[in-house]
Amino acid sequence: MLHETQPELKARSPLPKRGILFYARELFRLRLDKSTSRVSLAAICFAVLFSVIAGRLVQLAVTSETASEFRRAASSEISAARPDIVDRNGEILATDVRMVSVFAEPRNIIDKDEAVELITAVLPDLNASELRDKLSTKKGFVWVKREITPRQQAEVHRLGIPGIGFLPENKRVYPNAEAAAHVLGFANVDNVGIAGIEKYIDSMGLQDLNGAGFNISAADLKPVQLSIDLRVQHALRDELMKGMTKFKAKATAGVVMDVNTGEVLALVSLPDYDPNNPVDALDKDRINRINVGVFEMGSTFKALTVAMALDSGKYNINSTLDARSGLRYGKFTIGDYHATHRVLTVPEVFIHSSNIGTARMALGIGVDGHKAFLRKMGQLTRLETELPESALPIIPPRWGELNTMTIAFGHGLAVAPLQALMAVGALVNGGVLIKPSFLKRDEAAARQDALQVIRPETSEAMRYVMRLNASNPAGSAGSAAIAGFYVGGKTGTAEKVINGRYSKNKNFTTFTAVVPADKPKYVFLTIMDEPQAIEGTYGFSTAGWNAGPVTGNVIERVAPLLGIPPRFEPPAQPFPLMSRLNAWGVR
């Protein structure tokens, strides 16, 4: 027992070391007792492999879903459709066209510098440093360029840069360029209305629908039909442009309005802008002077004073007023531009545009009565229409007798020209004050909220004196008395206020016309800012020499378009009441 045999020693000797390769060979030898181990290992390997793949897929899905959310949100925002805008005859004034914009997913762009270099080569107007900053962020979505052309889209597509894509969107297009620019306004690159009717459309709930996620298209939206007549709009703009050039005016503007419905058929303010590229829209010289500007309207305001006097019952068409000498008030003296130095009847006060006569009328009514009448005529509050842009009138902070005297002939109160025209419309349409509208409507709808502000008899008297002012040689409206259209009108010239003082050599001229004067359908207004005396005006720059003839040209051109045929025989008994009263000037 003390000595072990040789076989026993061999059996207890240490086993040789075996490596991984040995066990791998043993595992894959075709032995039945090793099959279970082989299957188990293979299963573990496949499980690990599929786990890695699944994890990567989840990661990609999450990243893609985030990017898609960005794209969906952007697409929803920019694809917001707007309804077409059409004129009263169905002509397109504004519509949407489909465009394409380039976006990037910075997370998926591998070589930022190469991407910037390639993209700016195709789109050279892009700023390379700004684009590099955009692509260097961790955002899932950034804009590269909005609204590219089909050729540019094809060139960017050919670059084949991962992480660069395209999104369709709507672009607002105005096929008539500057025509009706101040009425239409414009939409920005995101198709959101910024001004004019475009902003009005958004205020009526369009942006609320888009914000709520409603995916609407232009086909889902009913076109917005305006009161504007594109034919009249073009003609008015053309004639105003000619007049502005001829009389070297700083600016000019005009409007045509239906006196029975309040519909604005044309509105132009020059200089204007192209809403397709509204880079100049905010220039102070390109404001809408008809709706946004406020001005002292000069002698056109005398029509309101005469109407106030006649409607009060304190004066009638045959009343007389003393204009033999200036009207003194303290240290101030009111005189006439073309003094007659005699007693004048009411029609003569109107056609001679007597400051003295109208001031005496206003004093006869009194300060409180004068203010009440102008408030009733809509001249002391902001005029609100579909256009969001409007201005408050400038009213004297302390309104005394002197203010009433000067406001009677159009100085000392500044209003928007459209609200002055609204009042004139009421003077001649039977006495009904109808708020102007830029949407098409009929007379019944227009008169639902209208107010009777003067008696029909007063309205006939105002039609009579306005016609007399155009037909009588002493009147100031003869330059607009186009044969066949029985025009009535009133001129107005106001000295501009420069640095708080009236300028003696800078005028603001106005002309208001009614067609036809016996049964009015339309009123016309032309204003000119700083027109100059030219050859043939004998050194004058007053309204009868510039705004008047320009308005006459407009009437002659657009009256046939508005369905007013010329009449070369005067109407029988156009003003029956004036004939019965034997008013001054009745033939």
Image (spheres, rainbow, N blue to C red):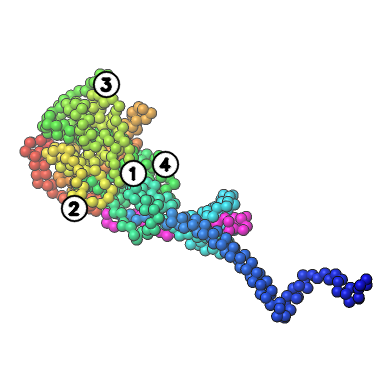
Q: Which of marks 4 and 1 is nearer the N terminus?
A: 4
Residue ID at (23%, 21%)? 328
Residue at image position (64%, 71%) is 43
Q: Name the residue under label 1.
A: 388
Q: Residue 565 carries which label?
A: 2
Asked whether the beta carbons under mark 2 and mark 1 sit within 8 Å of each other, the answer is no
Observer-nearest of 191 and 366: 191
Q: In this view, does 46 lie to the left or right of 407?
A: right
Task: Look at discs 4 and 2 and give the one toward the viewer.
Answer: 4
Q: How many marks?
A: 4
Q: Is mark 1 on a helix, strand or loop?
A: loop
Q: Closer to the camera: disc 4 or disc 1?
A: 1
Looking at marks 4 and 3 on the same chain, the residue that comes earlier in the sequence is marked by 4
Give the labeled residue for mark 4. 283
Residue at the right extreme of this rendering: 3
Say what amino acid the circle numbered 1 marks. Answer: Pro
Give the residue number, with chain letter if any, for mark 3.
332
Task: State whether residue 237 is above or below residue 115.
Answer: above
Q: What element carries label 3?
A: strand
Of the residues under marks 3 and 2, which one precedes in the sequence?
A: 3
Spatial separation of the CA atoms under disc 3 and disc 2: 49 Å
Q: Which amino acid does label 2 sit on?
A: Pro
